[in-house]
Amino acid sequence: MSETNNASQPLKILLLAAEVVPFVKTGGLADVTGSLPPAVRALGHDIRVAMPRYGRIDPRRFNLTLLPETFVVPMDNRMEPGQLRESRLAHDVPIYFVENARYFDREGLYMYPDDAERFIFFCRGALEGVRQLGWQPDVIHCHDWQTALVPNWLKTIYARDPFFARTASVYTIHSLAFRGIFGRRVLEIAGIAEYEFTASPDGARDGQVVDFMARGITYADVINTVSPTYAREILTPEFGEKLDGLLRQRQDRLFGILNGLDVEAYNPATDPHIARHYTAETLEQRAENKAALQRYAGLEVTPDAPLLGAISRLTDDKGFDLIQASLEPMLQHLPIQFVLMGTGEERYHRLFLGLAQRYPGRVAVFLTFNTPLARRIYAGTDIFLMPSRFEPCGLGQMIAMRYGSVPLVRAVGGLVDTVHDYNPATQTGTGFLFRAYDAWAFYAAVVRAVETYRYADVWRKLQQRGMQQDFSWQASARAYVDLYRLACALRTQAETMAPHTP
């Protein structure tokens, strides 16, 4: 590793994540970790990615090459064997797959009793793997609880290791709601029990649990969330998931960087899944997509009816308690149609299937996640609903704007950072916002949107403003590079100020 990291020197960054597009995906994390590295690479930096090689990742399908270097990972009182496979993301970004059949050769990704042990092995295996490759990172970029012990290790077991002693860490919080809480036994498995002190970062009075998320926040050189507003929100009890006190202690190291969007993949001018291609200048051609969606969903093919859509996990966190309270009154009093795609809580499955039966031709429900259908919904709906209780960033509202579906969102997190409220007086804005987490506030926003939809020229300009927003990864990638450099500087500063022992 070089002595300095000045503004012109390329960085070496190792990005660790539990999931990466196109290999596996359960949520927005995978979109970020699949799109950010190529954008950073395009800026001239040597960024590489590591993730577990789950059983569902077929080496032949993804052309994974087994690397000859082998390594062992200390796990509690034993050594576990590990090996890397390699593939490539866009812009020739190397991605390494940490392989161990006992931990990862399973049907699913998460929700196993030994998840803590599995991801401890993954993270330490990634570090030992790149050591065997002789590739020494300046920064390790960790994502969510599955990788949160790495900053802890860099300040303890790897603090005097010549290979990692000057490696900085950046810890990205995608959602505080998933913290990774386990029993204290995991500290022994992770090799850090001997470094524990009376003051623990885990936030538990009884001291009997280990909070992975809290440790990432405590030990990382720099912390960030996936939108500026969410970075401010999590400093409060309402959004802080009982970690707001710890976050306030470290708020000088806390930043918000808005996620980007893969604008090549999400492009209505080239999308192979939609009925008719179009641009902001040819929006009249978009009507074919609405009609195609209506036919596919069994809705009445009526171009003048505002078609509302949602693609989401069906949970209260995503605002479906508001939709539950409001949708039937909307159907009774407004000339709308509604299409939903997603899965979640069984009570919501029953609710929406019942509404589809009571309002045939006006409500369509698809209890699945399906990429081609999702693109048709983005391209065919008029209004896209995201009434979330909290939303660290959100990609749905960005994709909707890219496809000319006007977002209607609650003013929280990344939603308020990306959607600007329509102002009829100034003819500005890209969507409709409401603030109070209240069914009536949500209903009023829908009424406002449906009323605006009646004016075709006004609506077309609203769509065009949304489609013209720049949500590409370029600006976000530059912000992450600045964050990496800051982490390196802070790490060097801490090393300089630390007392030297013989």
Image (cartoon, grey):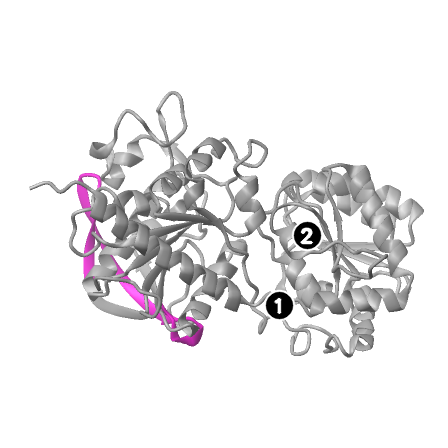
Q: Is residue 302 among what the camera can see?
A: no
> In the figure, is residue 409 to the left or right of 125?
right
> In the figure, is residue 463 to the left or right of 137?
right
Mark sitting earlier along the chain (2/1):
2
10 Å neighbourhood of mark 1: few (<14), some, or many (≥20)?
some
> Any magenta on residue 91?
yes
Outermost residue to the top:
206
Find residue 470 and name its label.
1
Q: Nearer the viewer, mark 2 or mark 1?
A: 1
Which quarter of the figure has residue 430?
bottom right
Q: Amino acid at mark 1?
A: Asp
**SS for dot 2:** loop
Magenta stretch bounds: 70-94
Q: Quadrant of the N terminus?
A: bottom left
x and y percent of residue 56 in the render? 43, 59
Q: Where does label 2 land, which residue?
A: 367
Q: Residue at coordinates 41% horizontally, 45% vertically from top-left?
A: 253
Please, is residue 143 above or below residue 237 in the view? below
Closer to the camera in the image, 352 or 267: 267
x and y percent of residue 17 in the render? 40, 55
Please, is residue 423 above or below residue 269 in the view? above
**SS for dot 1:** loop
Q: Quadrant of the C terminus?
A: top left
> In the figure, is residue 134 to the left or right of 361?
left
Q: Is residue 28 among what the camera can see?
A: yes
Please, is residue 365 above or below residue 262 in the view? above
Q: Residue at coordinates 85% horizontally, 57% vertically from top-left?
A: 424
What is the chief secondary structure element of the magenta stretch? strand
